[in-house]
């Protein structure tokens, strides 16, 4: 089993990093709103590092910030500003001995799947979710479910039940418009989770993340372990604002099957697909079709390679709002008969 790092307490310093993309340099408003809430509402002291507000910082410089944050005994957790698209290049510059000797809660999603997986391989539980610019910096107020999950993940090792969102959004808002941060986003009615497969309960450590980043790691291979390493794990996957089509999603999950990985997972939790972006604004009908096609693509792959495990779809664990938190490598229980997914933070 992976080891849970110690948690911060109110008043502690926490590192704020941009190991993926330095978007606070372009959009300071949601970033600074997120920092303000982290400090005022959560009682933590944000500590920025040299590349946190630098767009285009080198992989080596970003890795140096990660190494320094983990090495600093005054830093009790590491949070990321946002995702990106090339963090896999940062990994070669990390010092595994420093990270292994100084385990800390690491929070990030999307491109930060790379770092979560890297820490998984070192035996350290991390936390998928909690981006400063989206979760903390949400316009108007934090989503109540996001805030509740983040408090539990930041400060406790308790069991926590993930719950279907009563209202959600996947519509991006213009961070360049000051009005964006003054109001909460419009929410669509939550339509519940969708369960498939057998009803037996599964408990195991989680592994996965953003499907596109998992794909990159599969291609590179360096940070993927032998298939038996994932035996009994709970796979979790979600897709990004790039809105990958169903064929791509199927092919990635298919490749996991051909590699012998898919057959070892005991259950799967699949995130609610983001189905809207600034440059692709489908009608509600088209959104529904996109979501259904992605679900069918995942089901098709599991039917071929691992048909006898429970799957649950539409869980808010990724690029949609609310942004719940999964302990990456922590204990997850999938209980289809009860319709429940619980995690231990």
Image (tube, helix red, strand yellow):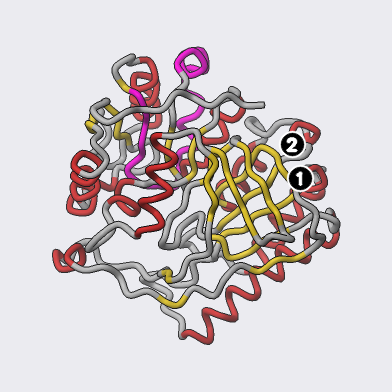
- In the displayed structure, 150 sits above or below 9; it is below
Residue 3 falls within the magenta-colored stretch: no
Residue at image coords 19%, 50%: 33
Classify mark 1: helix, strand or loop: loop
Residue at image coords 74%, 61%: 337
In the image, 338: left or right of 128?
A: right
Residue closest to the far left: 178
Residue at image coords 66%, 37%: 205
Residue at image coords 60%, 24%: 123
Classify mark 2: helix, strand or loop: helix
Estimate how packed mark 1 is, as few (under 14), some (14 to 19) or many (20 or more) residues with alpha carbons within 10 Å.
Answer: many
Highlighted range, magenta: 76-102
- In the displayed structure, 199 sits above or below 101; it is below
Q: Quadrant of residue 70?
A: top left
- Name the residue beneath numbered marker 1: 265
Which disc is residue 230 wearing? 2
Q: Position of residue 329 (x, y in %)?
A: 60, 35
Q: Nearer the viewer, residue 308 or 219?
A: 308
In the image, 281: left or right of 200?
A: left
Q: Quadrant of residue 332?
A: top right
Q: CA distance from mark 1 to mark 2?
A: 6 Å
In the image, 36: left or right of 320?
A: left
State yes or no: discs 1 and 2 in contact (Cβ < 8 Å): yes
Residue 85 falls within the magenta-colored stretch: yes
Q: Quadrant of the N terminus?
A: top right
Mark closest to the chain's N terminus, 1 or 2 = 2
Q: Nearer the viewer, residue 230 or 56?
A: 230
Which disc is residue 184 wearing? none
- The mark total stands at 2
Q: Position of residue 150 (x, y in %)?
A: 39, 45
């Amino acid at each position: 089993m992976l080891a849970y790092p110690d948690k911060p307490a109110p008043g502690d310093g926490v590192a704020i990093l941009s190991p993926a993309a330095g978007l606070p340099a372009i959009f300071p408003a949601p970033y600074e709103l997120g920092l303000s809430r982290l400090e005022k509402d959560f009682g933590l002291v944000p500590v920025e590092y040299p590349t946190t507000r630098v767009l285009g910082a080198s992989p080596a410089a970003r890795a140096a910030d990660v190494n320094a944050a983990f090495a600093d005994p005054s830093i009790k957790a590491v949070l990321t500003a946002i995702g990106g698209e090339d963090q896999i290049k940062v990994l070669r510059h990390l010092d595994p001995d420093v990270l292994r000797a100084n385990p800390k809660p690491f929070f990030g999603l999307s491109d930060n799947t790379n770092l979560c997986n890297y820490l998984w391989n070192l035996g350290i539980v991390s936390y998928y979710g909690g981006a400063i610019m989206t979760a903390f910096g949400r316009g108007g107020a934090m989503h109540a479910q996001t805030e509740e999950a983040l408090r539990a993940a930041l400060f406790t090792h308790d069991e926590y039940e993930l719950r279907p969102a009563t209202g959600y959004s996947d519509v991006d808002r213009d961070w360049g418009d000051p009005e964006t941060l003054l109001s909460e986003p419009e929410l669509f009615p939550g339509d519940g989770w969708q369960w498939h497969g057998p009803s037996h309960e599964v408990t195991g450590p989680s592994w996965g993340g953003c499907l596109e980043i998992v794909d990159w790691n599969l291609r590179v291979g360096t940070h993927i372990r032998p298939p038996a390493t994932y035996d009994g794990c709970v796979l979790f996957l979600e897709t990004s604002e790039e809105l990958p089509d169903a064929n791509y999603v199927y092919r990635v999950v298919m490749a996991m099957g051909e590699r012998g990985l898919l057959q070892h997972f005991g259950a799967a939790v699949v995130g609610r697909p983001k189905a809207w972006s600034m440059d692709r604004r489908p009608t509600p009908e088209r959104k529904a079709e996109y979501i259904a096609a992605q679900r069918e693509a995942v089901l098709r792959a599991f039917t071929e390679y691992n048909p006898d495990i429970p799957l649950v779809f539409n869980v808010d664990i990724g690029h949609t709002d609310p942004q719940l938190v999964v302990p990456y490598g922590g204990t997850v229980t999938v209980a289809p008969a009860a319709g429940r997914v619980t995690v231990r933070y």
